[in-house]
Image (cartoon, grey):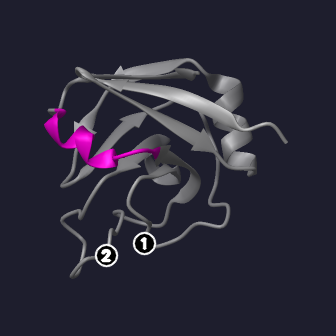
């Protein structure tokens, strides 16, 4: 399968992410482009989307740079460090998420994005 990359613009920052081969990734890909006002929660940016999906291989912790879907909030989440729920070095979402991609390069550039910034995800 050809890699599916997306461009994510948040505030003045742009990153590229590669989507994995999951049903959640397919749903997000089909919904692109999406944009919304982003919120921050620790080292996470999240924003509501029109995508509706249940838990699919949902996990309680994620890797640095994970791009995930949070079913209770119909939200895409970008993880670049610990959240208020994290213990130690782990990265823990508010509740389990469907990881559907990962940020290529350094995800910590997202630390400069403030809550309320416009976030846009589009096919790269």
Q: Main secondary structure of the magenta part?
A: helix
**Residue placed furthest toward the right:** 1
For residue 103, say whether it is visible.
yes
Residue 102 sits above or below residue 36 on the image:
below
Q: Can you give x and y, in whole percent of width and height, for residue 86 in the image?
A: 25, 73
Is-magenta flag for residue 107?
A: yes
Residue 3 sits above or below residue 97 on the image:
above
Q: Is residue 61 left or right of residue 90?
A: right
**Helix, strand or loop status at disc 1:** loop
Cα–Cα span, label 2 and label 1: 7 Å
Q: Can you give x and y, in whole percent of width and height, for residue 116 in the image?
A: 19, 26
- The residue that appears at 41% across and 44% down in the rendered structure is 105
Q: Can you give x and y, in whole percent of width and height, for residue 40 in the image?
A: 21, 43
* Labelled pair 2, 1 in contact (Cβ < 8 Å): yes
Q: How many marks?
A: 2
Look at mark 1 in the image and give the residue it sits on: 61
Judge by depth and name the residue closer to the eye, 30 or 72: 30
The N terminus - image quarter: top right
Q: Which residues are magenta?
A: 104-113
Q: Can you give x and y, in whole percent of width and height, for residue 100 in the image?
A: 60, 50
Q: Is residue 76 left or right of residue 25?
A: left
- The residue that appears at 56% across and 56% down in the rendered structure is 99
Is-magenta flag for residue 119?
A: no
Q: Is residue 57 left or right of residue 75?
A: right
- The residue that appears at 51% across and 21% down in the rendered structure is 34
**Residue placed furthest toward the front:** 105
Q: Dot 1: within a 10 Å radius of its alpha carbon, few (fewer than 14), some, or many (20 or more) residues?
A: some
Q: Earlier in the sequence, mark 2 or mark 1?
A: 1
- The residue that appears at 58% across and 21% down in the rendered structure is 124
For residue 50, say whether it is visible.
no
Look at mark 2 in the image and give the residue it sits on: 90
């Amino acid at each position: 399968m050809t890699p599916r990359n997306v461009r994510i613009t948040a505030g003045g920052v742009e990153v590229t992410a590669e989507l994995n081969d999951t049903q959640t990734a397919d749903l997000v890909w089909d919904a692109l482009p999406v944009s919304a006002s982003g919120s921050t929660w620790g080292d996470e940016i999240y924003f509501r989307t029109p995508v509706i999906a249940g838990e699919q291989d949902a996990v309680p912790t994620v890797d640095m740079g994970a791009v995930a879907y949070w079913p209770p909030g119909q939200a895409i989440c970008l993880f670049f460090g610990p959240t208020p729920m994290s213990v130690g070095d782990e990265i823990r979402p508010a509740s389990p998420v469907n990881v559907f991609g990962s940020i290529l390069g350094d995800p910590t550039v997202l630390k400069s994005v403030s809550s309320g910034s416009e976030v846009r995800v589009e096919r790269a």
